[in-house]
Image: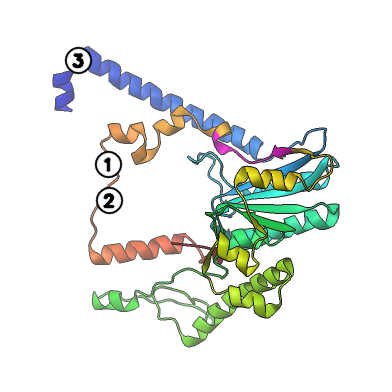
Amino acid sequence: MRWMRKAFPNWALTVMIVAAVVAIAVSVVAIVITNIFAQEQDSRRFSGPVYPYIARITVVGEISGFSNRFASSDVSYHHRWTMQTIDTLIGDANNKGLILWLDTPGGTVYESDELYLKVMEYKEKTGRPVYSYMRRIAASGGYYVAAASDEIYANRNAWTGSIGVSLGTMFDVSEFLEEHGIRSTTIVAGSNKAMGSRYDPMTDEQLAIFQSIVDDAYERFVAIIASGRGMTDQEARALADGRIFTAGQALEAGLIDGIFGEREAEAEIKAKFEGRPSLVDCFYRPDAYYRSLFASFLGGGQGILGYLLGYDGSEFIKGDVAAVLELAREQEESGAPPLKYLYEW
């Protein structure tokens, strides 16, 4: 603070401090108000126009139940809102079809499957067509959802595929801790109750149990591809080894139906409908509702407040044991490893 005293007279320094305190207070109030508004906005459903239209739902980012209402991207996937919107479309006679505009590496098995089933429900209850368009990426859970479509198109630069399942990475730090004089004791009833614990070596039986969980989700994925793309089980399984496909490779393999730019895809899809109904976007924009200058002000190390406090984003250097224990603690707090249809790099 000495440099500030030298650079500014006492009255100017006082004004700066008071301004900072007022800004922080206003920021807190703004965040409280936006959170209250967010709770109301989250439950607000899409309301379609009174004329015939094709609905386009944008799915950007990971498909999961988590939604960050202060996300920095222009468009973020919001699972509950998307499910509610499709329900609304099902009951709207003016809606003539659905387009899924995908730019996602996939996500959790639960939410990917829920979205897939909701799209299938839309098709079965309305008899209306569903199309998918892949922008930069629609891999793993993104392709899982797209498989519910009548036809799938992609940008020539798109990546897709990554057909497989992940249960995440499990760490066993028991030997490391023992070398440093730290022993752990897990008290359970049932030999496999603590399976996956990073403090105990995984047995062959436990590994087989986890593998069976992954295999079950994998078999479902393969069956959905075979059904959605009119393939045999063997044909679908040959493509389901986790690899990524370019748009050209996916077209050759029968995973998509065409390669178009975004405007070309819009025209191609609209031409399939009688009367060429309007294309109406219905996507969730958290920024449009919730973000504010005040929220940005409190943006931790990336915000103005972090800068004023001298935070530069660096972390304290920890010792080996402390770092491993911290990793174990973070994994415990995160809960069970999520089963994912997700392309990770």
Where residue 99 sits in the image (x, y, percent)? Answer: 70, 48
Whole-Å distance between the Cαs marked 2 and 3?
34 Å
- Name which of mark 2 and mark 3 comes first in the sequence: 3
- Element type where label 3 sits in the image: helix
Which residue is at 34% across, 40% downward?
301
Which residue is at 78% across, 45% downward?
89
**Three-letter amino acid code of the residue under disc 1:** Asp
- Name which of mark 1 and mark 3 comes first in the sequence: 3
Q: Is residue 13 left or right of residue 121?
A: left
Question: Which of the two residues, 154 or 25, is positioned nearer the viewer here?
Answer: 154
Q: Are circles 1 and 3 on residues that touch, CB within 8 Å?
A: no
Which residue is at 62% across, 38% downward?
39
- Element type where label 1 sits in the image: loop
**Which of pointers 1 and 3 indicates the residue nearer the eye?**
1
Question: Which of the two residues, 62 or 42, is positioned nearer the viewer here?
Answer: 62
**Three-letter amino acid code of the residue under disc 3:** Asn
Query: Mark 1 highlights which residue?
Result: 312
Tell me where the magenta segment starts and ends, as one range: 279-287
Q: Which mark is residue 10?
A: 3
**Mark 1 surroundings within 10 Å by alpha-carbon count, few (fewer than 14), some (14 through 19), many (20 or more):** few
Q: Is residue 74 left or right of residue 89?
A: left
Where residue 14 sits in the image (x, y, percent)? Answer: 26, 17
Q: Which mark is residue 315?
A: 2
